[in-house]
Image (spheres, rainbow, N blue to C red):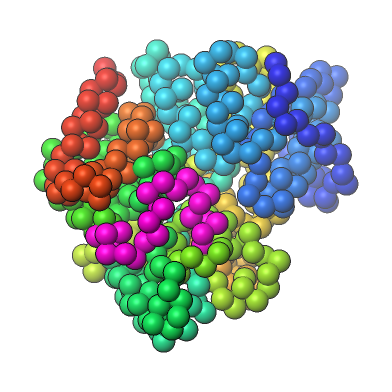
Amino acid sequence: MANIGRRPLFHGALGAAAGLLARPYIARAQAKTAVVWQNQGFVRQEDEAFKKTVADYEKASGNKIDLSVMPFMALNQKAISVLTSGDVPDLMYFDAPSAILAQNAWDDKLVDVSDVVEPHKSQMSESALLNSTFYNKATKTRSFYLVPIKQAATPFHFWNDLVEKAGFKASDMPNTWNGVWEFFKPVQTELRKKGMRKIYGLGLQITTVGPNDGNNLFAHFLIANGGKDIVTPDGKLHTDNPQVREAAIKSVEFMTGLYKDGFVPPEALSWNDADDNNAYHEKLFVMNFDGTLSPELAWMSHEKEYYQEMRVRSLPLMNDGKTQMICQVGAGGGFIPKGAKNVDVAKDFMRFFIQPQVINENLKSGLGRWFPSMPQIAKDDPWWLDDSKDPHRKPYITEGVLQPTMAQWLGFNPAWGLCNAEQLWGRAHADVIKGGMKPADAVDKAFKRFEEIFAKVSFS
């Protein structure tokens, strides 16, 4: 197997917490090595935290972890390639494996890890469980194919100094989904009057490129407009539901309207998942809706911007003005491809990792960009909700842990992931913006393709 971007193993000093961990699952006399691929963290501390977890496991078990760390997109492409060829590592650890898991579980290419997850099942959030269990067409059952360690919410990020420069206050922001987006339209207008002629109000990922941000954004618009049941837990698609169709039409109409009215940078139609972050840091626009705290943590060393100018806010009410908006979240962690040469050690490492104290130490050391798949951890440890040292973490954790959440739809049916891969929502936006199509017609076109893809996936 080729080694891509392999880094040396970390053998640093171990923390005191290692002595508190459970007895190793495999005896030292049977010491083995597992090959593990991990996606590179967004900040340096995430990689250091993972290496620390590896080192703690090696000391506790006597086993070895042969670790390779790759950028997210490189690992994503490599994972797809080896799952096809069969030349696989023993474990893949992904922050956001949603584009890979459902389809490969369906195709019977992953190892069932129910024996690792079941002892901790009662501690997991429902959304983490639903996005870790997938239907296998060979066994005709749903099973755990991901050991869920982490989850992430998608909050609003905005430059408060620009809001105030425009003559507004964050407290003026309406508490409804569309209202938050509308708030930044006059902010843009006033800033341009003050000479900032190239500033935009909104970083709307209305992209046809993807892979993730545009799909995630549209999902939240759909939920806000009452369309959360487009796919139900039984795996059925409900494009024939008038409420779902109306929610999709409202979403496409509102989003394309923001773009056509000039409140979104023109290049947003071709953004990838990093472009909106880069543009936000350059203050090309005032507000962005983006997963995790990555926009803030990338600027931790810029104290003035981090503590005084940047702001994070959790989700408002839905557009009905009555119901708390639901945050759609996935799950990240480890999965084992079929063909792995050392499944025993791969599972043993994840049994070690899934212990609550290990999860907590790892994610805290990674600066809290991800929160635990076990909500009680964040509720019990004051660090997660203490805003005296970090102004951004509390609203983020409030959204992902204390407010309602729901699983991503691909957890219900792998066909949803295939639809996302085709960027059907981005193409619907382009049909309106570039093709002059009416929003209702663009939605009907997208729905037709959804129905074609879902028709190929049967649970019978």
Describe residue 115's horizontal placement relative to residue 252 as left or right: right
Residue that appears at 57% across and 41% down:
95
Residue that appears at 77% across and 22% down:
33
Task: Depth check: give the residue in front, 190 or 170.
Answer: 190
Quarter of the image with the C terminus in it: top left
Residue that appears at 40% across and 14% down:
139
Q: Position of residue 231 (x, y in %)?
A: 26, 38
Splitting the image into 4 quarters, where does residue 285 fall?
A: bottom left
Q: Which residues are magenta?
A: 257-280
Magenta-colored stretch includes residue 282:
no
Magenta-colored stretch includes residue 266:
yes
Q: Position of residue 309 (x, y in %)?
A: 56, 76
Q: Is residue 127 above or below residue 314?
A: above
Q: Is residue 340 above or below residue 375?
A: above
Task: Depth check: give the residue in front, 96 or 290.
Answer: 290
Residue 399 visible in rendering: no
Describe residue 5's horizontal placement relative to residue 330 as left or right: right
Q: Position of residue 156 (x, y in %)?
A: 44, 64
What secondary structure do most residues of the magenta stretch adopt? helix
Residue 290 visible in rendering: yes
Q: Position of residue 264 (x, y in %)?
A: 37, 61
Quarter of the image with the N terminus in it: top right
Q: Is residue 334 above or below residue 81?
A: below
Residue that appears at 67% across and 52% down:
43
